[in-house]
């Protein structure tokens, strides 16, 4: 094993270094035709027409790993699949951060689960606020590196495209962060929305920078939020270590089957068309919202949502609600006291958003 991979594995909590995890009935490599080793039922449930849910699933279904690896352009051994990328975030924090000792660094306003998982683990939370620049809400990479070094952060979460800001982090900045924190921290690049962006995935950086890990999900562009399929992509050695810390059967069989079907070429082609449609609606809405009454600022977005500041965010929220439209109120988030996040819907739904906001001028 290379020294640089070993340096990444050394970041694992010392008490987990030789942890073997749970050895499930499915994980032991024995063969037979009569399977009586997992206390499963000998008959399928009458409601389970295909009988595919009677047995515990493969912990990491090979067909799903293969399909995801093809789509993400990596090897199956680089993947850990779990219940949404939420599970991978939680797993990373639990495996690498000793309570009270190893900090997690985040860049608010940003996806809340990083801080929630840190809190649950008792890991100190470090924050470098996004900078509100003319180009949008941007990560202050120098400040991230300085604070992470100074406070010995163990995990640094970089969200690109960022939720809710919509901004992206340049590949060169991800590389710079990983280089600066080599041997000290894992840089986790959350790419939940990258399908809507034109930027290349950070997976291309993994070979040269083993302290980078990338999060992907089928919940957004692939429209499978309820199937809960999220993936961590990293060095195979890191994945192997995290597998030992994961729940025994993290991928329900019906979800794996659905995901494999969704990753077939014909379906992927339709998904790509949908993504192109969302991107074009995002651009239309970006311009149209700027002309809507009471809108202070619309941030450019590389995701499937727009962050919008209003003169009166409550009134805008209420007007949308009165039109039966629910958007995400961001006002409790730092720097976003006047902002709502609006997901890009179907063209008809987006039209209703514009109509509801424009009706305010007519009513005023
Ligand atoms: C940036 C970001 N990361 C991760 C997730 C979690 O996604 P999943 O459904 O894969 O758990 C979300 C969900 O909203 C998100 O916005």
Image: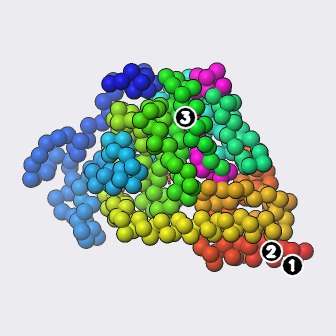
Mark 3 or 2, closer to the camera? 3
Are there few (<14), some (14-19), or many (20+) residues within 10 Å of tag 3? some
**Alpha carbon separation for disc pair 3 and 1:** 50 Å
Q: Describe residue 99's horizontal placement relative to residue 288 as left or right.
A: left
- The part of the chain drawn in magenta is 146-166
Q: Give the position of the N terminus as an image quadrant.
A: top left
* Residue 148 visible from this viewpoint: yes
Q: Earlier in the sequence, mark 3 or mark 1?
A: 3
Q: Are marks 3 and 2 in contact (CB under 8 Å)?
A: no
Q: Nearer the viewer, residue 337 or 132?
A: 132
Are there few (<14), some (14-19), or many (20+) residues within 10 Å of tag 2? some
Are there few (<14), some (14-19), or many (20+) residues within 10 Å of tag 1? few
Q: Earlier in the sequence, mark 3 or mark 2?
A: 3
Tell me what residue is drawn at x 75 percent, y 77 percent: 355
Q: Nearer the viewer, residue 331 or 42?
A: 331
Tell me what residue is drawn at x 20 percent, y 49 percent: 39
Coordinates of residue 124 in the picture (x, y in percent): 61, 29
Residue 362: assigned label: 1
**Alpha carbon separation for disc pair 3 and 2:** 44 Å
Residue 152 in magenta? Answer: yes
Secondary-structure class at tag 2? helix
Which residue carries the number 2 mark? Answer: 358
Residue 175: assigned label: 3
Give the colour scheme shown.
rainbow
């Amino acid at each position: 094993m290379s020294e640089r991979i070993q340096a990444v594995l050394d970041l694992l909590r010392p008490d987990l270094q030789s942890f073997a995890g749970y050895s499930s009935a499915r994980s032991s490599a024995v063969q037979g035709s009569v399977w009586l080793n997992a206390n499963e039922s000998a008959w399928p449930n009458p409601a389970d027409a295909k009988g595919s849910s009677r047995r515990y699933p493969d912990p990491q279904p090979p067909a799903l790993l293969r399909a995801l690896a093809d789509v993400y352009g990596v090897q199956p051994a680089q993947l850990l699949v779990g219940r949404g990328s939420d599970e991978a975030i939680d797993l990373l924090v639990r495996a690498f951060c000793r309570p009270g000792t190893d900090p997690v660094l985040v860049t608010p306003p940003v996806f809340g689960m990083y801080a929630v998982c840190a809190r649950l683990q008792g890991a100190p939370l470090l924050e470098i606020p996004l900078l509100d620049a003319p180009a949008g809400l941007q990560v202050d990479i120098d400040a991230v590196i300085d604070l992470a070094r100074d406070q010995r952060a163990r995990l640094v979460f970089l969200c690109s495209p960022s939720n809710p800001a919509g901004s992206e982090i340049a590949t060169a900045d991800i590389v710079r962060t990983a280089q600066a924190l080599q041997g000290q921290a894992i840089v986790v690049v959350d790419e939940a929305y990258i399908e809507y962006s034109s930027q290349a995935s950070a997976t291309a950086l993994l070979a040269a920078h083993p302290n980078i890990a990338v999060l992907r999900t089928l919940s957004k562009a692939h429209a499978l939020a309820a199937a809960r399929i999220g993936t961590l992509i990293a060095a195979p050695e890191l994945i192997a270590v995290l597998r030992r810390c994961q729940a025994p059967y993290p991928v329900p069989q019906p979800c794996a089957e659905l995901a494999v079907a969704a990753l077939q070429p014909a379906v992927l082609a339709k998904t790509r068309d949908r993504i192109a449609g969302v991107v074009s609606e995002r651009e239309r809405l970006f311009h149209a919202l700027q002309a809507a009454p009471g809108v202070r600022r619309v941030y450019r977005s590389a995701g499937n949502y727009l962050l919008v500041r209003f003169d009166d965010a409550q009134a805008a929220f209420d007007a949308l609600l009165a039109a039966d439209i629910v958007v995400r109120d961001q006002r409790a988030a730092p720097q976003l006291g006047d902002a709502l996040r609006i997901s890009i819907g179907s063209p008809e739904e987006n039209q209703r958003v514009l109509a509801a906001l424009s009706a305010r001028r007519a009513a005023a």
